[in-house]
Image (tube, rainbow, N blue to C red):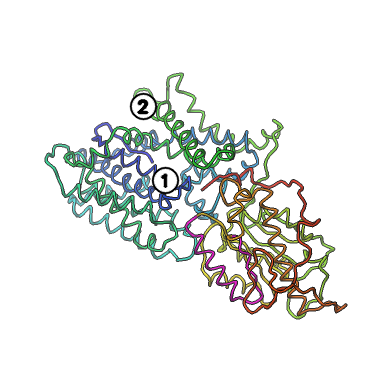
């Protein structure tokens, strides 16, 4: 995040150290380091710090001159923020155009939203989760810059009015009241057990962190502290407690804990304000600790580091998939730091020091290239699809738009359909089983889809990268309307976020009473893994006509089947995964056929005592499971190479 600078602003080196800690926490979260599940809260620290600094600038100018020079204020914000962002957008878009041109159509909207600082609302309206696993969007992290820029546009208008009260304590009180309204709004909108997109992205629900910093600026202006001496031990104590709280939240919290949205983030903002208050005092020792030279150097480049680290993680990981996790993480962090240092040296510093009043837009010749970023970014976003074709580049498969059957195995019009409308359906032979199966899932199902189609010809597969259970009801209605929600339904929706048992039961109930279900639990090394698997296990054990595929257990010993992200499946793993699903469907079919015998009335094969297909937990009271039909490895799932979209997301791109 940027640090607003004015010529007369007092430099506080400890704040750069705080920036360094905050950006390191965010990077650790995006690298999915196991000791930083709450690293995303570093963004909240940035918000509070930015609120303090921007309000300190506004209050100082208004108190000195009686007014705020609006054009100068916003020009300086643009001078500090825009060039580095534009250069990053230009270079990342160029890289995608050359290396992953199939991604460009899906990135056009993200690119435009990033350019106009509305990424947060763009993702809210499209129901894109910040926490979904491995959506290949190198600009997804720019939501926080959008929140800050929107605050920079609106807050000066409000701050000038508040400053007219003339009393710092009243100014701070009014600002705190606004912050409490924002925090209460977040708590009200948040619903436990759901993906918190709206409250996490919203400017209105995140403003309290900026406003807490603003309230501190009214009471604790940096310039008035410059001449103070002595050791304010109580400030150091408060600041140290705030720093300890931030570090504890980084290690021990996660984005799906209810208390985080119902007071936790507000508490973090107060803790960050305590750190800032201590560092702003020249006599406080915490400022000297956080002003340590390496931390200060890193903090000065924190804006560029934040801009670059996420595109590096998303785009470089597939290139380095052969490296071990810690080696790859180190290489990505090092490359991000290098790009941030280059941005600081050649983009941010020269333009921040440029005398715009005297020279305007006439930059020295060697510094002009950045000005092409504005035009070039737009041209790349709009025209590189055609350019890629002219260059003869082979595009990777394009990710689907939301609310679409992303991976479809649509049955031929002539094949028999099983609409499961009720009553006793006509029995059908095993050879037609695929025509009576629907699979609904996320990116893991995308990986397995080609093998499912080989083993169960005619299967309907609806799978989409980033899909979550809360987005499934419209998919169910769409399948029902198309006559594609068949007798046997596979549900695999635990990769991208948590849900409650009531939500899962409601989804199954919405499909109707005549369906038989295969529920698949998840292997996803994220905070919600245990909660999701507990819910799936509980529902599978109690819902009628339901089998559980225990993918968490079955995948424990097959790490070679995963891409480096430890979630998505390489072709070998996808074949094994599909085999488990096919066995579950056949077991379910054998049970169903016992209650709906075919006209020949040939009895179904019986399973030898104690035999249960691997990875499948039978429902209680189901008795001995019938023997599965021939296993998928025998002539139905071959070793034929298939094309998946793993080159886009499956090789380790992380959120």
Count of numbered tags: 2
How far across and down, in percent of the image, does residue 653 sit?
55, 44
Residue 252: which quarter of the image? bottom left
The residue beneath circle 1 is 26
The answer to whether residue 538 is above or below residue 414 is below
The answer to whether residue 16 is above or below residue 446 is above
Q: Closer to the camera, 112 or 44? A: 44
How far across and down, in percent of the image, does residue 399 sit?
64, 48
Quarter of the image for the N terminus: give it. top left
Q: Closer to the camera, 117 or 284? A: 284
**Is residue 486 found inside the magenta-colored segment of the image?**
no
- Asked whether the residues under the numbered discs 2 and 1 touch, taking CB atoms below 8 Å apart as contact, a structural biologist would say no
Query: Could one spot residue 264 in this view of the protein?
Result: yes
Residue 199: which quarter of the image? bottom left
Q: Earlier in the sequence, mark 2 or mark 1?
A: 1
Left or right for 289, reference 465: left
Left or right for 555, reference 167: right
Query: Could one spot residue 83 in this view of the protein?
Result: no
Which mark is on residue 494? none
The residue mark sitting in front, 2 or 1, is 1
The answer to whether residue 481 is above or below residue 210 is below
**Is residue 542 found inside the magenta-colored segment of the image?**
yes
Which mark is on residue 356? 2
* Range covered by the magenta-colored residues: 526-551
What element does badge 1 sit on?
Answer: helix
Q: Closer to the camera, 192 or 328? A: 328
How far across and down, in percent of the image, does residue 123 sit?
51, 52
Marks 2 and 1 sit apart, C-alpha to C-alpha, by 34 Å
């Amino acid at each position: 995040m940027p640090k607003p600078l004015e010529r007369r602003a007092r430099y506080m080196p400890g704040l750069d150290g705080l920036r360094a800690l905050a950006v390191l926490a965010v990077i650790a979260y995006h690298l999915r380091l196991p000791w930083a599940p709450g690293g995303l809260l570093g963004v909240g620290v940035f918000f509070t710090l930015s609120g303090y600094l921007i309000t300190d600038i506004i209050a100082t100018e208004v108190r000195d001159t009686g007014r705020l020079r609006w054009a100068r204020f916003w020009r300086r914000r643009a001078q500090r923020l825009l060039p580095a962002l534009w250069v990053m957008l230009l270079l990342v878009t160029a890289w995608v155009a050359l290396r992953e041109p199939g991604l460009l159509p899906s990135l056009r909207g993200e690119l435009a939203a990033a350019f106009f600082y509305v990424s947060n609302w763009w993702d809210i309206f499209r129901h894109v989760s910040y926490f979904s696993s491995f959506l290949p969007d190198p600009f997804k992290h720019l939501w926080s810059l959008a929140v800050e820029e929107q605050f920079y546009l609106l807050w000066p208008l409000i701050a000038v009015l508040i400053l007219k009260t003339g009393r710092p304590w009243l100014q701070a009180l009014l600002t705190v009241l606004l912050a409490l309204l924002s925090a209460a709004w977040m708590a009200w909108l948040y619903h436990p057990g759901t993906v918190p997109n709206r409250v996490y992205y919203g400017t209105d629900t995140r403003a309290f962190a900026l406003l807490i910093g603003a309230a501190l600026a009214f009471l604790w202006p940096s310039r008035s502290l410059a001449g103070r001496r002595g050791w304010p031990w109580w400030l150091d104590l408060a600041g140290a407690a705030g720093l300890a709280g931030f570090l504890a939240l980084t290690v021990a919290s996660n984005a799906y804990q209810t208390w985080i949205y119902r007071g936790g983030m507000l508490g973090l903002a107060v803790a960050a304000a305590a750190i800032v208050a201590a560092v702003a005092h020249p006599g406080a020792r915490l400022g000297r600790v956080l002003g340590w030279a390496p931390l200060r150097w890193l903090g000065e480049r924190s804006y560029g580091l934040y801009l670059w680290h996420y595109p590096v993680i998303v785009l470089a990981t597939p290139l380095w998939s052969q490296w071990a996790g810690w080696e790859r993480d180190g290489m990505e962090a090092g490359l991000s730091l290098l790009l941030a240092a280059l941005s600081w040296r050649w983009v941010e510093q020269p333009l921040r020091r440029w005398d715009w009043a005297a020279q305007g837009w006439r930059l020295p010749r060697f510094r002009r290239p950045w000005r092409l970023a504005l035009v070039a970014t737009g041209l790349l976003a709009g025209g590189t699809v055609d350019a890629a074709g002219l260059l003869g580049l082979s595009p990777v498969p394009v990710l689907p738009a939301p609310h679409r059957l992303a991976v479809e195995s649509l049955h031929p019009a002539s094949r028999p359909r099983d609409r499961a409308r009720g009553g006793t359906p006509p029995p059908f032979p095993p050879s037609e089983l695929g025509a009576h199966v629907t699979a609904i899932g996320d990116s893991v199902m995308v990986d397995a889809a080609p093998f499912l189609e080989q083993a169960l010809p005619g299967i309907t597969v609806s799978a989409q990268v980033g899909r979550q259970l809360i987005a499934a009801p419209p998919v169910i209605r769409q399948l029902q309307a198309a006559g594609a929600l068949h007798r046997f339904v596979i549900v695999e929706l635990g990769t991208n976020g948590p849900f409650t048992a009531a939500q899962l039961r409601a989804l199954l109930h919405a499909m109707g009473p005549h369906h038989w279900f295969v529920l698949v639990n998840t292997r996803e090394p994220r905070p919600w893994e245990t909660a999701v698997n507990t819910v799936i296990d509980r529902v599978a054990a109690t819902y009628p006509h339901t089998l559980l595929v225990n993918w968490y257990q079955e995948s424990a010993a097959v790490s070679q089947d995963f891409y480096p992200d430890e979630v998505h499946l390489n072709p070998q793993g996808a074949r094994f995964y599909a085999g488990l699903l096919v066995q579950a469907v056949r077991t379910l079919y054998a049970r169903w056929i016992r209650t709906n015998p075919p006209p020949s009335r040939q009895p179904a094969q019986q399973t030898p005592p104690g035999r249960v297909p691997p990875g499948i937990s039978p429902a209680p009271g189901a008795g001995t499971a019938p023997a599965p039909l021939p296993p998928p490895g025998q002539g139905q799932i071959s070793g034929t190479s298939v094309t998946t979209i793993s080159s886009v997301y499956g090789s380790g791109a992380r959120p």
